[in-house]
């Protein structure tokens, strides 16, 4: 007996035909269905093709039956609105005007990467001040603090009168 086709989700396919499943697309071969690539939003991706989702970049990896989407980079939002690929381990500054933040793309394990705020960046006529969370410094005639929100974990920049620099709860001079 010779094999003349494949069956997938109740449908018959001839040898050489390609068809789509919910996560992958296949070619029918004389030895059965073979995964060719990944499906993402109704698009066929080849092995190694990339796509962006939720400020992360993924690659379609086909390795026999171990096929999956592999996250490999984070997305930086440029000042002009463009997206810039940042690989795991890269750091960059993002933000406009006097307030910005330094981010790092981190591998969190479990097939996940995340864009993480590292420190606050305050720009003034005296230069650029980088502040770790919990720190305050003098910039021009004001005190600038980098606070971490306890519920969201996000950083934010707060400014105060310079005379209050040594009396700010939760902030230390750095």
Image (cartoon, rainbow, N blue to C red):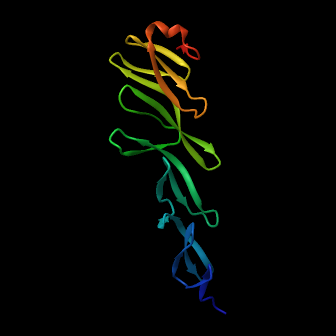
Vertical side of 63 occupied by 75: above or below? above
Residue at 57% x, 72% y is: 21
Residue at 55% x, 23% y is: 133
Classify the position of the N terminus by image quarter: bottom right
Vertical side of 70 occupied by 88: above or below? above
Seen as rendered, the residue at the extreme bottom is: 1
Vertical side of 174 occupied by 18: above or below? below
Q: Position of residue 75 (x, y in %)?
A: 46, 44
Q: Position of residue 87 (x, y in %)?
A: 49, 43
Observer-nearest of 9 and 91: 9
Quarter of the rendering containing residue 168: top right
Q: Position of residue 17 (x, y in %)?
A: 51, 81
Residue at 59% x, 42% y is: 107
Residue at 44% x, 9% y is: 162
Vertical side of 15 occupied by 94: above or below? above
Observer-nearest of 95 and 127: 95
Left or right: 19, with 97 as reference point: right
Left or right: 140, with 135 as reference point: left
Tally the numbered discs.
Answer: 0
Q: Position of residue 6 (x, y in %)?
A: 61, 83
Quarter of the rendering containing residue 76: top left
Seen as rendered, the residue at the extreme right is: 1
């Amino acid at each position: 007996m010779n094999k003349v086709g494949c069956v997938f989700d109740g449908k018959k396919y001839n040898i050489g035909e390609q068809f789509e499943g919910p996560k992958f697309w296949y070619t029918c071969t004389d030895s059965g269905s073979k995964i060719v690539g990944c499906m993402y939003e109704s698009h066929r991706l080849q092995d190694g093709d990339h796509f962006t989702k939720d400020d992360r970049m993924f690659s379609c990896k086909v390795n026999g039956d171990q096929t999956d989407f592999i996250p490999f980079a984070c997305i930086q939002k440029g000042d002009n609105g463009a997206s810039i690929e940042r690989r795991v381990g890269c750091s960059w500054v993002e933000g406009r005007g006097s307030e910005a933040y330094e981010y790092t793309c981190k591998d969190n394990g479990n097939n996940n990467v995340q864009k993480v705020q590292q420190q606050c960046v305050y720009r003034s006529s005296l230069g650029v001040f980088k502040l770790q969370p919990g720190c305050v410094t003098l910039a021009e005639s004001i005190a600038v603090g980098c606070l971490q929100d306890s519920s969201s974990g996000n950083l934010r920049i707060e400014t105060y009168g310079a005379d209050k620099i040594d009396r700010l709860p939760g902030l230390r001079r750095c």
